[in-house]
Amino acid sequence: MKAGLVTFYHIHHYGALLQAAATERAVEQAGGECEIIDYYVNQNNDLFRKPTGLGSAAADAHTALHYAALKTRYDRFEQFAKDHLRISGHRFESGEELRAAELPYDVILSGSDQIWNPKIFPNGRFDPVFFGEFSPRRKIAYAPSFGVPHIPSGMERELREYLAHFSHLSVRERQGQAIVREVAGVKVPVVLDPTLLLTSEQWSAMAKPPVKLPQGGYLLCYCISAPGPLEPYIRALAEKTGLPVVQLCGARQKVHPKARCVLDAGPAEFLGLFQNAACVCTNSFHGTVFSVQFQKPFFTAVAPGELAEPESSRTFSILSRLGLTDRIIGKGDTAEIDAPVDWAAVSKRLEDARRSSLDYLRAALQNEPYCPQRAADSQDAALPTLAGHSLCTGCGACMSGCPKDAISMERDREGFSYPVVNGEKCVHCGRCTAVCPLLHEREKGPLPAVYAAWHKDDGIRKDSTSGGAFTALAEYVLEGGGVVYGAAFDAKQHLRHVACFRKEELWRLRGAKYVQSDLGDTFREIRAALENRPVLFTGTPCQVDGLYRYLGSRPENLTTCDLVCHGVPSPGVWEDMARSIEHRKGKKLQAVRFRNKVTGWKDSHFTTVYDDGTVDTAPLFRTEYGRAFGRSLFLRPSCHHCAYTSMTRPGDFTLGDFWGLRPEELPDEQSRGVSLLMVNTPHASHIFDQLPLARKAFPPERAIAGNPRLASPVPTASDRAAFFAAYALEPFDAVRRKFCTLPPLPVRMATRLLSPEAKEKLRKKLR
């Protein structure tokens, strides 16, 4: 059985050559022969670039300065290909030439790498060659990647026709599995990248040990893009271990001031550098792979999009399979910097995954059915599977609903609370998964009635963030003998939900609080209170939905009000910011108002009151915390996937600011604040008619115009991972100064003058 392999192999990237070499050897291990079909496409290894602008000119200048080392690297790539790749004797320039050729293969194998990514090719279309369309021979696929989260619109039918010709299909990432299922309607296995099919002993045979490097080990840094969130880990590891820093240069930016840069490494030297390292920091997938292969303690960083969408990440895919996702930087569950790796457990998982992937390849080559073996359940597998880390809102419904108190809410390294299941207490009743809102589709009702509203009492309105609608609703419930639950700060600036039984206490609940609140036992307290009195609960939409899931119904004496939410910042970060403010001022905080109307509703001020009676106030977005909040720097991960960014809300009411009012609309009211009040249910409509509010109706689309979070989640900040990487390792004041301080005056002036298009171009350059 001879396979003709179509893959990326010629480009001078370490991963490309190593995966090609691994695929050939894996086919041999599976009982076949393999030869790469020499199809040369879109792969240029020239040391100097064609001039396209300042970027290429700067790269060429760097190449000229380091020409000898980079020429050595070039030659070593060419030599590695000659030594370790079997390539067809003829180079094919096109699909037409391949179709006309008599090819000596029994099967065409579409190999690994992003060969099915249409965006790689100059015309932005699939290349039929990488689907084997040039040959009538049987076609199989091993670990190809689409490299994109979704197939471009209009190309689904073309892909479906290509895939229909394969007898055996597999993919490299879960996202690819989803694409094939959606386009072709079939479920295919996710198999290992070919570089993981070989053992460390096989890779060692191809490695060349580094020369003129420290013999006692070193911290190896391999970055294919700007180090970003890796920087604090590189600094901390270098300081803690005392190891010299060696940088294998993918990206040309120096990652550490004392790094020794290696520019001349070919693939064999690449392997040797990993084999002899003491530990590794990398943002390369194959850097991660060979850290695992040679069992080197490592930390890896991924792109912001991969953190936001782990299912699209090949790094997440393999590390989750190996139980190593805690080695990914910029997450709340990243391991401590000196935490050991359980290599015995990793080796067992890798052996199982390798065996399964080789079984697939063997079945594909022999044209036999592939029946994946189920891995033995681990001890933890029997525990309930709640919403994933990137989706969990922290509502606590699972904790409140557990009849055995087997779930606690514990803060991660980002300062957010997540459920942790105690395996000794858990009786596997399924109650926690039954009440988790993210595990069940929410029923969506009709569009709400939308109003601009404001309290008729000017004193209450002045003391409120916008129009005072919350106070009107709360007083209505209290006058009926009810209790109001909302968020209030305690003396340590910890935000928690509390109960208010009297109007005089409502001041604690008024005003915006840009922190995620601690619900504690609020849901259980509400269940008990509902037995004998009306209850108003106000919170974020995910908290409201969590309450309903916990209760299992919508009691008639419960009224809920969800908030138009930009996203919830980390309680840990806020509390560190509060301590920092106190330390710098030399006095304790007594109260904080995030949105104070000292100069009007549309010019919100961040106001701090201290225990000696002094007050500081400044425009919110000119303060460190306000600026970082506006940039969405430290929001909960789930906020970037928010399931509640729509006009069909879980609460009876939805409350926010009526941003987007035109100057001619309510001109006498805008300076004093106007609430956006959405009436979502008949229950809310009955109450609304009785509230002491002035009001004006608007069409639903006007609510979205001023509050885009009613339509879509807030994007992830590009430097979020870098912020939390630094937050995990460095003193907070150092992190605050680096990420939260205002830019210099010239930069602020430039941002006011630049157009949005110019700003976006500048951001891309700076990345």
Image (spheres, grey):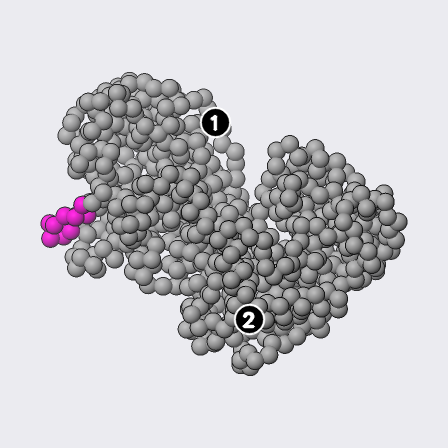
**How far is disc 2 from disc 1 in space, using C-alphas?**
57 Å
| Residue under the point 17% across and 59% down | 586
Residue 262 is marked as 2
Identify which residue, 218 or 420, lies in the foreground. 218
Which corner quadrant holds the N terminus?
bottom right
| Residue under the point 20% across and 45% down | 618
Q: Secondary structure at mark 2?
A: strand
Q: Tell me the quarter of the picture where residue 486 sits.
A: top left
User: Where does the image place residue 714, in percent across and percent down from the top left?
Assistant: 42, 40
User: Where does the image place residue 528, in percent across and percent down from the top left?
Assistant: 34, 37
User: Where does the image place residue 347, in percent across and percent down from the top left?
Assistant: 64, 66
| Residue under the point 11% across and 53% down | 612
Q: What is the magenta segment's predominant secondary structure?
A: strand
In the rendered structure, the answer to whether residue 67 lies left or right of residue 155 reads left
In the rendered structure, the answer to whether residue 408 lies left or right of residue 59 reads left
Q: Is residue 613 magenta?
A: yes
Q: Can see residue 27? A: no
Specify the segment rendered in magenta: 608-617
Q: Is residue 173 magenta?
A: no
Q: In the displayed structure, would residue 235 be above or below residue 636?
A: below
Identify which residue, 389 or 163, lies in the foreground. 163
Residue 444 is marked as 1
Q: CB of mark 2 within 8 Å of CB of mark 1? A: no
User: Where does the image place residue 13, in percent across and percent down from the top left?
Assistant: 63, 60
Q: Residues within 10 Å of mark 1 (few under 14, many from 20)?
A: few
